[in-house]
Every structure is written in structure tokens, then in C-alpha cells.
Image (tube, rainbow, N blue to C red):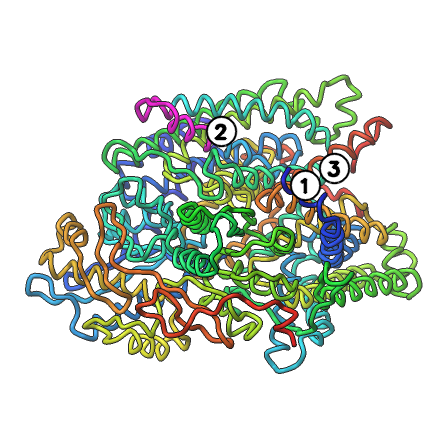
Amino acid sequence: MTVWKWGVALLALAATGGASAMAAESDDTIVLGAAVSLTGNYSTNGKNTKDGYELAVKRVNEMGGVNVGGKAYKLKVVYYDDESTPARGAQLVERLINQDGVKYILGPYSSGLTKAIAPVTEKYKIPMVEANGADRDLFTQGYRYTFGVLSTAEQYLTEAVNLAAEVGKAQGRDLKTFKVAIVVENDPFSADVRNGVVDDAKRFGMPIVIDDKFPRDINDMTPSLTKVRALKPDLLVVSGHDKGALLGARSVYEGRVDVPMMAMTHCDSAQVAEKFGKNADYILCGSQWDRSLKYSDKWFGTAEEYAVRFQKEFNYAPPYQGAESTAGVLVYVDAFTRAGTLDVEKVRDAIATTDLATIYGQVKFDETGKNVAKPMVLYQIQNGEYKLVAPTKVASAKFLYPTPAWTERMK
Amino acid sequence: MRALGFAAVAVGAILALAAPFLLPNYVAQFAILWMMVLLALTWDLIGGQMGYNSFGNIVFFGIGCYAAAVVQRSLDVEYFAGLALGGIAGLVLAVAAALVLGSGILRLRGQYFAICTLGLGVAAGELASGWDFIGAGGGMTAPVYPGSPRGAGVFFYYLFLVLAVVCFLTLRALYARRFGLVANAIRDDEDKAEAMGLPTTQYKVAAWMIAAAFLSLAGAAYGHLQGFIDPRDIAFSGETLGVWMVLMAILGGSGTLWGPVVGAIVFDVTQEVFWTYLLGWQRVALGVLIVVIVVFFPQGIIGFLAERWPERFGSRRVSSLLVPDKVS
Amino acid sequence: MDNLLVLWQAPTLTLQLLIDGVLVGAIYCLPAYGMALVWGVMKIINVAQGDFVMLGGYVALYVSYAGIHPMFGVPVAAAVLFVFGWIVYQLVIRHIVDRDLFVSVLATFGISIVLQQLANQLFSANVETAEANLGSTYLFGSTIVVGNIKLVAVAIALVLAVVLFLFLKHSRLGQAIRATAQNPRAARILGIETSQVFAMTYALNAAICGAAGALVVQIWIIHPYIGLTYTIRAFMIVVVAGLGNIAGVVLAGLGLGAAEQFASFLLGAEYQAAFVFSLLVVILLWRSQMLARRRLYLK
């Protein structure tokens, strides 16, 4: 029974160990908290997220910090590693709020993790500005404290489906014969990309002939592509973070699968064009942001200047995951200033009324907390490079259609 | 000696009851701590006491998770009533699953049982992530706790504390009876136990059903505590909770009553410390710890103590892992 | 059922799926040989198997970064992993050789998560792939297409199987390995340094996995957390084929590859993994049922 003594001793140890972990709060610093994926499946994009936050914090502090009611505050972010698992993410946010006394949360990477964290911030009535959770589900729960600066997942490939309808009509085809094939990863984000494509296709009356969800530990996409070969869809949609993009691009060209039009997500962060060059040509990629867009703000100047600064700091070109994370911090900075106080409820209200120009685009939330002011863009890989092809307002290249057959391309 | 033991238990009980008020900021972590204790205890019932090392117990946890959330979603009742009904639904489903699966799988022996349960755990997670009714890969959301966050923390703390204590007392009562002797007989030599006329499969299935009952209740509460249920990372989280329950039991000393309790507490606290201070390297530390535990302390903390001070901790053989069973 | 109809209408697709499946299965065979070897000789289930595959992939990737064709990464990865496996043996495995199988599962699980996170910190978690640029082959007109790299991989897998078989049968070390597998005590009495044999066996296993990884990075993708996929498949193959049966491992591996392709095609990709793992459970139950009739147990 003496075992209990050990138990008690350990509990005491736990208590002291934990207590010293308290974040040192000083009165001229605003502390934001973030659980991001530094390890695990999402750690590449998790790092993009963290770098985006860091760059914003650094820049804001360089420029004198945040002015709240006439007093300048420095920004600081406390990070934890959520290991890409939702359970850990939720626990860590609980810890950020309870033990570290953080009053403002920045989102994690990926929809799944954001979905796990949102109930926690909601419970504590602590605002979360998230930049990487695109699942629409997040904004249909009636959450009052969750704000997403990015366009929701169902919009990722809307432009691609629109383009498909356009070329279909131009050819004088009945869109009811314009077949769509969907191959996505079985995770919250990709599932919502799929739902978006299904809705868009329904709008145009396009039939969906393949609807596959591949498992997370996928290593081979050929069965789905064999279906594509058999059913000959006019549009193939692939989504599944970086590995989905890489596997999709590679399997299509290695299997010489002919599809007139192929659209994906995450090409830029997976570096599809850099890795496969011309073999990845004609692929369309939905993206949240591009450095060539004419967005600008008072912290970084233009999007291009932001990209240069990012590259200098971290030695890689910023994917949109970095830019949107930066925007997440900027939303807080703007809201603190407009609220003029650090009262959590007032800051939340200030966030809700945000209407801010950033290098990532305009940020303006609707009543559910999602950003409705920023459009998605669509790249096409042409000659091994990303070219903006839609929407037409910002396009810098012409959309090439249809994709020539592989027998032509390999000549 | 006995008086001292009682005193220790009394102090521990008071601390456990008062923890949410002594350290209000840690209440969520302590709630998880009690869940870990429960997980380790239920694993040890079948793993340590009977020698059936299962990697698939997480299945019952996941069933509880989803059952409670589905009940909350489909019945229009108040939060606590929904949780209670969901817990009962999960319990019934999980126990039934243990009965059906157990009567087949528990006939396997040794590593084949371990691998089969591993397959079962992964398959359950994958099936759940393909099933649209429960949100497929997108997961499910449990309702938000109606009340203050403090209240939620305290509520779940006591819920897990009660579950863990009831589980502990149930197992203690079982181990003190014939059941405990049969369990150990199965572990030590199943063929002989069978030859003596013991219905070993029935005992094994019964043990799995008891474990399933507690696991499903823990799952129901955990799903509600998290508020979000992901098929592979929260409900059927074989790579984390599923393996940890094994490690915690072994760390403390599998095959003992107190071992899993001690192991869970030490493991959970260590893990929290690693996560706080070793950002990015915590899993390296955890992996090294696992290797060190199983390689150098396979008898666990309680086993180690029993070896050093048998007069104080009892000299009962504690672990099947100590027996070199092949190369001799 | 629609999918079945598609197959019925286009029979060449069945052939395409079968060929793809066999090619996938050939890759699974490599870590499975290694696992069968280590399991049979040392009575150790090596959960870090897939992580050796992953490390082999990174070796080949860095070879390709150095401007060398990634195919040369295959021998380099094998050599590097051989040394690595030997080190792991000396550090950890040595201590658990004569313990319960379950101890080996847990200990190698620990090694596995250490390797995963070390790879994460060293190479970052980027999903990587190396280009072999070997082109593709059209069969039967243009109805079936196979990446040449997959054909090469199959050839390498088969050659390795034969070499391994001959090595175990005829070489001095191979005979020592087999003797140790049969009866370590007798082998020791006969003057075989069993600890040396174990170290060599484990290192050899790591080398085979390394070679497999070098192929995987050229055929699919690698990232630090890909290992478990290969570990679990290797497990299944060995369980089905039994120990000490290279031909069985090859057959089971190819069969698993084909089964996965058809399951994914017919049931939808979301049920591919569920199918594979349910299959594992069913196979084990079936085998134990068969043995139970003879009053035996799977042991």
C-alpha cells in the first residue's frame, strides 16, 4: 500500500513541474498562443504556418509593435507541437488557455485540427483567428469565437469547375455528358473540397462518374486511375494535401492516363512543377494566394515584397499557407488597435467587424466567421511553371485546353 | 505498516478529490490522467493478468466515443441525459462486440492474438473513416458543454475519477476471487488450465467484456471532453492511446493491481513534461524511454520494487514478459 | 456493383489491375523477406521494418540530389542500412533477443517512433520523390500501361529473393543462420558465434529494407511517417506465408498486392485499408480454425 506514497509524490512533482511552465507575462507584451504541427503528417505545412506567424510578429515588432489605446505592445507567440493529431491539439489549446494564460489563439494547420480546437476556444470564449482550417463545417456550428481568414475548402476548385463548364459550352456540348471524376483523401479538408466540386458539378448538371476517397496511408493511386482510364471523364479532380498532389501528378504521367482536364490542390506546397517539370503540364491547381497578385498592406508593402522578405527569412518561397498565417496575425493586430483595449470580448467584436487589406487579400468576416472578401485563384502548370489562369481579372496566362494525349506529349 | 498504507490511501483520496480546487488550471490534464489510469487497468486485465497482449482494446473505446456522439446527435435530449444514454448505448454495443469478436479472436494464442487485435484496431478505424453516417473521414462534433468551462473541467474530472476508481475496485474484487486465479492460470499455462477442466475461453471472453464496458464509458466521456471525434486520431487511436495503454501497464508492472495505476501516472506526467520542454524532440525522448523501459525494466516499477523489497511489496510473480520462452 | 460492371465490360482492365497489383506486391515482398528472416532466426518481430524502408528512401533521395541516378541509390541504401541495422542491433536488439516476442514488438515500436521523429527533424516532413525517368511501357496495343521503374523493381525484388535463397542455402554464414534458427543452443555448442549471426541477420534485414526504400522513393513517395504502411503489410505477408518459406513470402506478397488493387477498385479506395486489415483478422481466424480441428494452436 506504500505505493500510494509514490503516487502522491509524483502528483506533487507533476504540479511543480507544470507550474514552472507558466508563460512569463509582462505588461507590455501581448501573448498569442498556437498549437501547430511541428512533427507528424502535417509538419511541412505546420512549419509554413509557424513561419507565417513568426514573420508577421517580427515585422510588427520591428515597426514599433501594436498600438492599443495609446500604448505600444510587443507581440509574442507561445507554440506547442500538436504532432498533427487532433486530440493533442485540443489538449494543448486547453493548456495554452489555462496554464499559460493565453487569451488569443492562432489556428493550427489543417481542417481536422482546427475542428478539434474550435470547441475548446468556444468553451472558454477565447477568440481563435485561424488561417488553415478550410472545412465549411467549421462555420456551420454557430461558433462565435472562430474566424477563418482563408476561403473555405469547397471553393478551392470552384474556378476549375467553372472553367470546365465554359470550355464545355464553347464546344457546344451538353454539360450532362461532361463527366467528372473525383479522387480525394479521406480527411476533413479533402472531403470538403470534394463536396464543393460535387455541388458545383450539380449546378451545371455534370455527372460524377468516380467518387473515390483514398486512405491516409496511401501508397498507390493506380486503382482509381484505372477507373479513370475506363470511364474517360472530362475532368479529374485530385486532392489530398502534399502527398495527394505528388502521387496524383506522378501516377497520371507514369500510367499515361489521358484526361482533357485535371485539377488539384496543394501543387505549390508539394512543388509538383519543380519535381515533375513538363510532365506536370496542364494540371490546374487551386490556390488561396499568389505573390503576383496585386494585394498590399502597410506592414509588408505588396505581396511580392512580402514574398521576398519571407524568402530571405526562411530560405524558401512562401506557399499560400505562409501568407494566410501572416494574415491571421495581422487580423489580430488590426483588431487590438481598433478595440483600443485588451478586453477579450471587445477584441472579439473588433475581429468580427474586420475589414482589412493584407498582402493575402481583403479580410472581412461574415456572421459565421469565414472570410468572404477574398477570391481563390487557379494556376495552370505550363512549361513547368505556375501560371495564373483564373479568375480572368487577375489571370496572367491563357488557360490551355484540352490536355494533349500522352502519345503526343512524349514525342 | 498496514496503518501507514491506509493513511497513504486516505491522503491520496483526499488529494484526488481536492485536485480541481488545489490546481484549478490543471483540471483538464488531471481528467486525462484518470482516463489513462483506466486504460492501463483495463489493458492489464487481459494483457498482464491473462497474458493476452492485445493491441485492439481501443476498438471498444472508439465504439463508446461514436455511440455517445450519435445518440447526442439523433436524440433531442438535454446534454447530460444524452451523455448518459449515449454511454449506455456504447456500453451495450461494446460489450456485445467483445462477446462476438472475443469468442473468435481469443482462441488465438501468443503473437498471433497480438497481431490479430492490431489488425482489428486498424480495420475499425478505417471502417469508421469510410462510413458516412458517422461523418466518415471528416469526423463528428459532440455538443459543447452547457455551462462554464470551469464547470466542464470539474465535471469531466470527477467523471473520469469515478470511472477509474470503480474500475479499480471492480478489478480488485475480481482478482481477489477465483477469477483472478483462473486468469493467472491461463497466463502461466493455458493448456494445463484447460486440461484441469477450466472453461478458459469463457473466462477470457468475460474478461474482455468487462474491459470493453469500462473502455466504452471512457470513450463516451472522452469524445464529449474533446468535442470533436476523428476516426483514427481520437476514437480508434491505436498509434497513440492504443499503444500507450500497453506501455503504461508494463511501465508500472503488468500483472499487478497497482502497477497500471502507477505506470499511467508516471507515463502521463513524463509525457506532459516532454511535450513542454522538448518541443519537436518529445517523441524521440518518448521512444527512447519506451526502449529503456521494455529492455531494462520489463518487470515495471512495482515489479522492480517487489524484487528489491519483497517483504514490503509482495513477492508475487508479476510479469509474463520476464520468462525467456524460447532461446534457452 | 457499378465497378464490377466496368470490369466486365473492359476485361483488359482486370489484367491491368492484376499487373499493377503484382508490381505493388513485389515491393511488399522485400521488407517481408527481411521480417521473416529476423522473426525466424531471432524470434523478433521488427516493428521498425517500415522505418528502415523509409530511411532507405531518403538515402536514395540524397544520392539523386548528388546528381547520380537514383537507381544507384539501391545498393548505396542497402549498404548504409546494413551498417545502421548493425548499430541498432548492438544498441538495443542484442538485449531483447532471448526475451518474449511481445517485448520485441514494444522495443522496436520505440525504435520506430524515434526514427520517425529523427527523420522528421533531419529531412523535414516534406513529401519527397525521386525521378528515375525510365518511361513507361505499353502492352497489348495501348490498353495496358506500366511504369518501367515498377518492372525494374520487380526484377530487383525477384533477384534479391533468389540471391537470399542461395545465400541461406549454400554460404557459410547462411548455414550458420539456419542452424541458429533451428537450435541456437546446439549451434553455440558447435562453435557458431550466435551473437554474430544475430547481428548479421538483423543488419541484412535492414539492408533489404533499405533497398526496398530506394525503390519506393522512385515509384511512389516517402515521408518520415510512411513506415507503418510497409511494416503492417510485411506482417500480414509473413503471417500468411509462415516463417522460413521464401517462395511463400513471394506468393503471399504478390497476392496481397493484387487483393489491394481489386479491393480498392471494387469497393472504393476508402475501404482499401479496411479491407486489408479485415482480411488479416479473417486469415488468422481461419488458420486457427483449421489448426483447432487437429487440436493445435497457432503458436
Name the front one of labels 1 and 2. Answer: 1
Q: Amino acid at mark 1?
A: Leu
Q: Amino acid at mark 3?
A: Ile
| Left or right for A370, reference A347 | right
Q: Secondary structure at mark 1?
A: helix
The tag on residue C5 is 1
For marks 3 and 1, give the CA distance: 28 Å
Frontmost residue, C51 versus C14: C14
Res B282 seen here? no
Res C192 seen here? yes
Magenta highlight range: B64-83
- The location of residue B77, given as percent across then percent down, is 32, 22
Same subunit, labels 1 and 2: the answer reads no
Q: Quadrant of the C terminus of chain A?
A: bottom right
Q: Amino acid at mark 2?
A: Ser
- The location of residue A213, given as percent across then percent down, is 54, 47
- The location of residue A135, given as percent across then percent down, is 38, 49
Badge 3 or badge 1: first in the primary sequence:
1
The residue carrying mark 3 is C283
Please report, as a chain letter, where disc 1 is located.
C
Q: Secondary structure at mark 3?
A: helix
